[in-house]
Amino acid sequence: MLNPSKRSKNTLLFTALFCQVSAGMAADSAGVPQNLATTDTIPLFKRLPTLEKRIPRLPILEQFTPHERLTKLEQDIASQAGLTENPFQGRLTIKRDDLSSNQLGGNKARKLEFLIGQAKQNRATTLVTSGMWGSNHALATAVAAKQNGLKATMILGPQPLTENVRQKLLSMHTLGANLRFHSHLVGMGFDIAKYYIKAKFSGGNLYYIPSGGSSERGELGYVNAFLELSQQVGLEQLPERIVVPVGTMGTAAGLLVGSCIAGVFEKVQIVGIGIAMPLLSNERSARKEAKKLHRFIRNQVEKSDRVTIPDCDYDSEKAFSFVTQYYSPGYGAAKPVIFETIDRVNRLENIHLDRTYSGKAMQFIIDEFSASYQKKLRPPSTLFWLTYNSHDLNDFIDPYPWKNFAEKWRELPSSFWQLFSGELPLETNLDPSASE
Ligand SMILES: Cc1ncc(COP(=O)(O)O)c(C=O)c1O
């Protein structure tokens, strides 16, 4: 049985562990692949045509995700700051990766295009990855595995228990994923290492995906995402700032490298909001991740493309900033103000945020805009990159032929039962409808 008093400490440690393991294992050393990409040319392959020869991609996104204004929210922030009219309208927009791909939406869809592309090329039969019990990444990987006729193994570790976490576990089960329970981080780390080594010696059969899908290949999804935005709005109309939550750092690193490759480095600042343990998910590591990704791309392309990639100083403060204040009270937990923000955005814009990632990133924007409005200053034009998939999990759970509908959880491995039986209580101070 888990000791609830140890949970927040465990969560911190787990975050450290998963980041560390991902960072250590993320290097992509695949050989020269045959091209499995579709006939559609994505912005990344348009910009660097020789990359397409080397990087297989399985299309998941059917179209560009919407780019919209958040007019009502902007007006509401202005009213709260005491402005009857908002003289600075049009400063706040959103990139809706929540709509990237129905069941498999959120930021994972973009990463998985490249990860599953390589897994299929390697003729893998099984994907293995890791995350928290309620991991968005693990769920998205389970969906992608099912859609592509692959098996999936998920190595899952502790986080604050909510109803949403339970639903994610049931959803992964309905998708046929093999779920491996861990209540402690050390055991989980060993399990990840074991599967990583297994994958290395599996002759390609087992494909290892680091936590959060943050290997260089996965991160290409966000290099492409930046180029997609540039194509969508035009280079001259890009926002001054893009705000994005940072966990395993791949999304922010991808956007930062994207801004370099698009030729607008330092014109658009990527602002990362740290939501995971600062020891390993931090500014220095994020900058390092971007440098590694930049090198990876340079090494993959032919000379004709290489000469077109600018040199960018990834230590630049103008190009990237990292905000640490929103992490507290820890991964997967949030202060009451975050729940108010989640409700506010839902009520005004009909957009669903979560408390772990997107709620905290949005809170940063609201705080910054409020401070500007109070001083009657124009805030920088800001794009909120929504990375969360708010797809209704009941779509997975309800149609499944459970043997015992009242106690569905009994079909999960018995090690998970304590998360459903009341042995480990739900986090009652947290809004149960607010997702992981
Ligand atoms: C909804 C959501 N937003 C943001 C992130 C952070 O992305 P990254 O891990 O690439 O930093 C995650 C990652 O797990 C996520 O699930």
Image: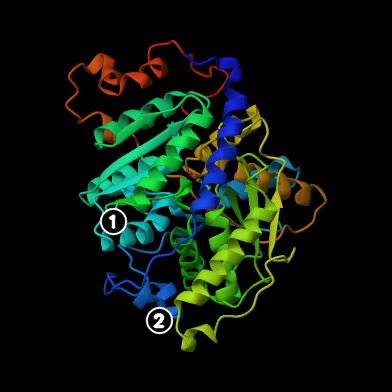
- Asked which quadrant contains residue 257, the reply is bottom right
| Mark 2 → mark 1, Cα distance in angstroms | 30 Å
Question: Residue at (53%, 55%) from the top-left corner?
Answer: 250
Secondary structure under tag 2 reads loop
Q: Respond yes or no on whether mark 2 lies under 8 Å from ligand 1.
A: no
In front: 241, or 194? 194
Where is 135 relative to 36, above or below?
above
Depth order, front residue of 64/6: 6
Q: Is residue 434 left or right of residue 120?
A: right
Tell me which corner region of the image, top left, top right, bottom left or bottom right, holds residue 122.
Answer: bottom left
Dot 1: what SS?
Answer: loop
Discs 2/1, front? 1
Question: Is residue 76 positioned above or below 91 on the image?
Answer: above
Viewer can see residue 91: no
**Residue of label 1:** 203
Identify the residue at horizontal 31%, vertical 42% (top origin): 142
Is residue 144 rendered to the left or right of residue 92? left
For label 2, the crowd category at 10 Å Cα-Cα, with few meaning under 14, some 14 to 19 and many 20 or more, is: some
| Whether residue 23 can be seen here | yes
Q: Position of residue 398 (x, y in %)?
A: 24, 28
Q: Which residue is mark 2?
A: 49
Residue 130 point in image, percent of width and height:
43, 40
